[in-house]
Image (cartoon, helix red, strand yellow):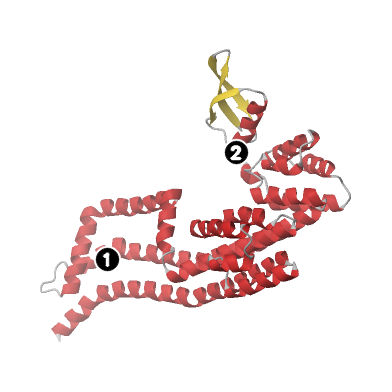
Amino acid sequence: MRFVAKVLADGRVVEQELEAASEQQLRAHLSGEGVQLIGLRARAGSRTRRSDFSLPLFTQELVALLEAGLSLSEAVDTLGDKAVEGATREVLKQLAEGLYQGLPFSKVLANQPEHFPPLFAATVASAERTGHLADALRRYHHYETRLSAVRKRVSSALIYPAVIIAVGGGVLLFLLLYVIPRFSQIYTTMRDLPFAARAMLWWGETVQAYGWWLGLAVVAGVAGMIALLRQPARLASLLALLWRSPRLAQLRRLFALARFYRTLGLLLAGGIAAVPALQLASQLLPDALRRALERALVDIRAGQPLAATLTRHDLSTPVAERLLRVGEQSGELAAMCERIAQFCDDELDRAIDLFTRLFEPLLMLGIGILIGTIVFLLYMPIFELAESIK
């Protein structure tokens, strides 16, 4: 990716065009060179290819090479040699350069946060103290696989309702903007029309007179909704309204706790102490639960038991509290955290299954009632006129 950097040289501000894998890498490089950076922007037309780099694939391949007996630097070089030109080779090149400079692998990963999340770097840092890097990477890959499975279940549960809403909305628009205006022409020559027929006739005349404006209004409304959802602040406000539903808020909390305890178990299994592990895992919590965890950390640092403290701050479930107590007493806290996450996953699965069994038929019924009502209103005036003739 190419950047235009404004730097201070000989008392003057000079623009330079530089190339780097990321903005963070370029800033670190200029800082190491002692260059005073004034401003930095991406060059027009320059794009990052972050999506070309696959962290799960990188993790799997690195574990396989390490278990085959290669050293870390040899494994990274091997992956770089087989990678095609693009973002993946550039990322691996930066990793190899950092390792040859003598930097810890966790530090090299932390220098590329756009590709390696803090949790991945922390997992590697814990393995550097124990010397079991392949085991730590395998645990992280298992962790990501489990989280990805939960995300897919949630996403798949939302796809079908979204399709039904889109198709139903399209059918409703077709009836309102095409079928009714043409069908209503039947009533133009009739007198003493019933109310439904007059309403159909009025709507048909309105569409014929202002059809283009109504169509533009529909398109503008859809485009505005898409633009609104692409703004993080607006999307967060809409989601905040959505989470006010007690049931949805409960499911969101359950999903957050599953991620939290699975992450906590991963970090504890890697040898990280409880307090730093809790601080790292807090990044995955919603704002309300993160603030609760910050208050809980104050009590934990004061020496209070983990299970009782997390329960008091509403960061556990009845099952989680019991398992945490067992983990504290037996010294198997990491394994208990993984079990808690599994219990949360099971409960979330049951909730998703109930959602699909109840909400989807109700959604189809609602859309069917709307479409049926419009069709009924189209033909009801004809039935009324037929009865009046008799």
Which residue in the protein does label 2 denote? Answer: 48
Q: Is residue 279 left or right of residue 373?
A: right
Nearer to me, 366 or 20: 20
Which residue in the protein does label 1 denote? Answer: 180
Q: Is residue 156 visible?
A: no
Are the residues flagged by discs 1 and 2 in contact, CB closer than 8 Å? no
Q: Return the x and y of residue 142 as percentages of the image width and height.
A: 72, 60
Q: Is residue 219 left or right of residue 19?
A: left
- The secondary element bearing badge 2 is classed as loop
Q: Amino acid at mark 2?
A: Thr
Q: Outermost residue toward the front?
A: 302
Q: Is residue 163 left or right of residue 186?
A: right
Q: Return the x and y of residue 88 as percentages of the image width and height.
A: 70, 42
Q: Dot 1: within a 10 Å radius of its alpha carbon, few (fewer than 14), some, or many (20 or more) residues?
A: many
Q: Outermost residue toward the bottom?
A: 390
Q: Residue at x 44, y 63 (%)?
A: 243
Write down the quadrant of residue 42 in the picture. Answer: top right
Q: Amino acid at mark 1?
A: Ile
Q: Residue at x 25, y 74 (%)?
A: 377
- The secondary element bearing badge 1 is classed as helix
Q: Return the x and y of residue 237 as percentages of the image width and height.
A: 41, 55
Which label belongs to residue 121?
none
Tag nearer the camera, 1 or 2: 2
Write down the quadrant of residue 10 in the picture. Answer: top right
Q: Outermost residue toward the left?
A: 192
